[in-house]
Amino acid sequence: MAIISFEESFFCHLRVVLDIDECATQMHYCQSNTVCVNLPGSHRCDCLPGFIRVDEYSCSEHDECAGGQNLCDENAICTNTIRGHLCTCKPGYVGNGTICRAFCEDGCRSGGTCVSPNTCVCPSGFTGPRCETDIDECAEGLIQCHNHSRCVNLPGWYHCECRSGFHDNGSYLLDGSSCIDVDECFLHTHTCWNHSVCVNLPGSYDCVCTSGPGCSGDCPQERGIRRNGEDWKPSFDRCAICSCKDGHTYCRRRPCDCGDPDQDLFCCPSCDNRPSSQCLDQSGRTLYPSGASWLYGCQQCRCLEGEVDCWSLVCPVLVCEYTAVVEGECCPRCVADPCLADNLSYDIRQTCQDPAGVMRLSGDTWHMPNSPCTTCKCKNGNVCCSVDLDCLQNN
């Protein structure tokens, strides 16, 4: 049998006497749904029957995160709390937890969509990490235009434009096959003169002189006569060359020969490979040689002897009734649906009837009954409705 000394007995009794019952004195940290259990020198918080532990001091009726009974976005982290839960967007996403959207630090250009952290999905016609590069469908041979037309690159798109001497028959087919020959002779748009006769050719015409004093084909000039078939450099344009053919003067730009040491670099900037003549584009990342062209936004830019000059992009002329500019593009396209058109000038004489039977003027907008996220607009007699996806997510 162990013998306890007086001193040991005294200190054991002192420890029992000095223990504080935190549960009885309400000096504990136990939260709702728990019961306080006193311990020597401490206490613990036990969950009530039917509740599960959240942390050392708290219990919840159930784990909403584990049970899938939460409103957190799929890109959010769910944290169970007392009588609820907390949603926090994952790294690389922004939002309030119930809605989390991917965040791209430099943004997505040209109408691109940020689908995951620093990852953009580009619309058709654009490429690059930030959708900053226009795909030149013409240069890369992705487009085969009809031989009566030529491919013209546009930001995010392309256009098969009728060649000189051809015009569209009104169907405006995308591949340019609707381009037909212009009969300059029938329309009297030719320049045949004197005793020559107009002969229509595919995409052009010719002037044939059969008889008469004007059939020599010589071309009168300010300083004399240029003989038929003669070429010369005109004084009004250092980069041109003119020819006399059947009494008519034709001037065109002289072809460039970069192998010629005496080549005029003013007329042929593409032959200028001097470093001082190169240009940086607007992003400061691409170096272009003199004479090169590129698209920036909705502008056509060109480098000329070290200087950048930009001007507004010239869009093809469309004669269709309805046109629309697709997101990320600069030029309009023909559309058949008036609800997609953005070139309408509203005619208040053309009205629409909403679901409530109210007559609406062209240009009026309203919300659909019992559907606050649906907006309708009257476009010259056509009821056009759209749904706001952000509104749906918040309702």
Image: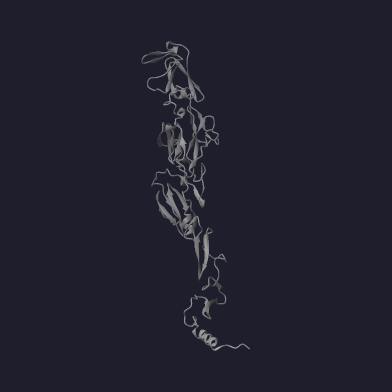
Whether residue 393 is visible to the viewer of this picture, yes or no, is yes
Residue displayed at 37% across by 22% down: 236
**117 vs 228, nearest the viewer:** 117
How is the protein colored in the picture? one colour
Whether residue 191 is visible to the viewer of this picture, yes or no, is no
Q: Position of residue 89 (x, y in %)?
A: 50, 59
Residue displayed at 47% across by 52% down: 386
Q: Residue furthest right?
A: 1
Does 152 appear above or below 113?
A: above
**79 vs 219, nearest the viewer:** 79
**366 vs 267, nearest the viewer:** 267
The number of numbered badges drawn on the structure is 0
Q: Position of residue 240 (x, y in %)?
A: 42, 22
Q: Residue furthest left?
A: 222
Does 66 appear above or below 221?
A: below
Q: Position of residue 313 (x, y in %)?
A: 43, 37
Which image quarter holds the N terminus? bottom right
**174 vs 228, nearest the viewer:** 228
Q: Position of residue 72 (x, y in %)?
A: 52, 62
Does 88 appear above or below 337?
A: below
